[in-house]
Structure formats: C-alpha cells, structure tokens
Image (cartoon, grey):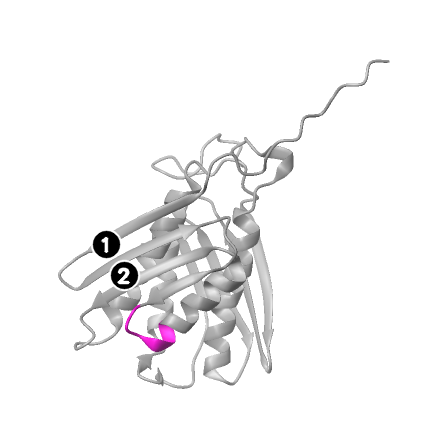
Amino acid sequence: MAISKIQAVSPVAVPRRAEVKRVTKETQISAAVDLDGSGRYDVHTGIGFLDHMMEQLAKHSLIDLTLHAKGDLHIDYHHTTEDSGYAVGEAVSRALADRAGITRWGDALIPMDETLTRVAIDVSGRPYLSWRVNFTRAKLGEMDTELFQEWFKAFAQSAGVTLHVENLHGENNHHIVESCFKGLARALRAAVAIDPRRADAIPSTKGTIGGSIQA
C-alpha cells in the first residue's frame, strides 16, 4: 500500500499586516496592526485610560498595535475614542484580507477579582455589537464610561465582526472595563488564528466573508 506524503503547510502564507490613516476635522489617527505579532504596542491617544486599554488589547491578543491619535480633546473624549475604534477595527479588517483560513469564532470568560465578563466574537463580515455592561460611575478619571460602548461599537463596525460583550457581575468600574478589553483580546486572538486544517479555505458555506456579500 502506497503511503502518501503530507507536506506541511505554513500557517501564515503572507504577512497579515495593515496600516490605516483616518483624518477628519475632529481627529487625525494612524493605526497599524500585525495579526501574527507578539503583543507589542506603541500607543498614544492623549487619553491615558484609553491608552491603557489599547495596551491590554495588544498584549493579550498577541497583535502588534501602533496607534497614534490627535483629537479635539478640548471638547471632550468622544471623537478620539470613537475614531480610534474605527481605525483599529479597519486595520484588523484589512489585515484579514479575504479572511481565508481563520478559525473565525472566539470567546473568552475573563475574571478580574470580583468581576466576571464574557466576550464572544464572530469574524463574520456582519458588524453587530451586543453590549450588556453597566457602570455605577459616570467617569473613570476624566473619561466618560459611556464612551467604552462607543469604542466597541466603532470597532465592530469597521472590523466587520459580530461582537457580544456581557459583564456577568462586578463592582469596580475599572475592573469591569478592563475585563471587557481583555475579553476582546482573548476572543480575537482565537478567532483570527489560522486553522491548520483549512489554511486556505474561507470559513463559510457561502464561500466569502466580508465586503458587500456577507457570510
């Protein structure tokens, strides 16, 4: 009986990197990602707490992230936060290209002291955010807590992902927010990983993900 030879296939045929520049009258943002990085980051948005969350996202997703933003912070933090979400999401989407070979789904259950948060993602091409997170404070430092939902909404929209974020319980608002970003990081890490059993295949029966034709 003949024994067939199985040739090893590199899990990543081409570098999965992208850079995005977003310039409006409200913000000037550049974002770059390497999906197959090691979690390195270079983040400067002018908003300390947002920088901290972007660093968490990079560190725990193993996605190298560069994010530099200048915005109308003299008004408030809304535009810079939202547009940062758009820029990072678009960079991820571009780096994924046709999304061939990816695992597609990912989820994470993140404990942080008294807090427990669940995040699930489908890199589907269908932008959607389900946000079940409540805060007991209007601000963390100088940042409005309502802006975290705006970041996740913008990210889901531009990345083309279905994203569910649910805080199951928690008391400390800092822990709640941080567990949401760490959950996204871990879920995204799993979802964009290359599945060695279908490294060249689109993970959809439709044969396509993203763009105008959604899976």
Can residue 176 be seen in this snapshot?
yes
Residues at circles 2 and 1 in contact by the CB criterion of under 8 Å = yes
Q: Residue at x 35, y 38 (%)?
A: 211
Q: Earlier in the sequence, mark 2 or mark 1?
A: 1
Q: Give the mark count.
A: 2
Look at mark 2 in the image and give the residue it sits on: 83
Can residue 127 be seen in this snapshot?
no
Q: Which mark is residue 189?
A: none
* Magenta extent: 45-50
Compared across the picture, whether 34 is left or right of 211 comes to: right
Would you call the spot at circle 1 few (<14 residues within 10 Å), some (14-19), or many (20 or more)?
A: some
Look at mark 1 in the image and give the residue it sits on: 22
Along the viewing direction, whichever of 130 and 147 lies nearer the viewer: 147
Compared across the picture, whether 159 is left or right of 197 comes to: left
Would you call the spot at circle 2 few (<14 residues within 10 Å), some (14-19), or many (20 or more)?
A: many
Q: Secondary structure at mark 2?
A: helix
Determine the image quadrant of residue 199. top right
Q: CA distance from mark 2 to mark 1?
A: 8 Å
Compared across the picture, whether 35 is left or right of 148 comes to: right
The three-letter code of the residue at mark 2 reads: Asp
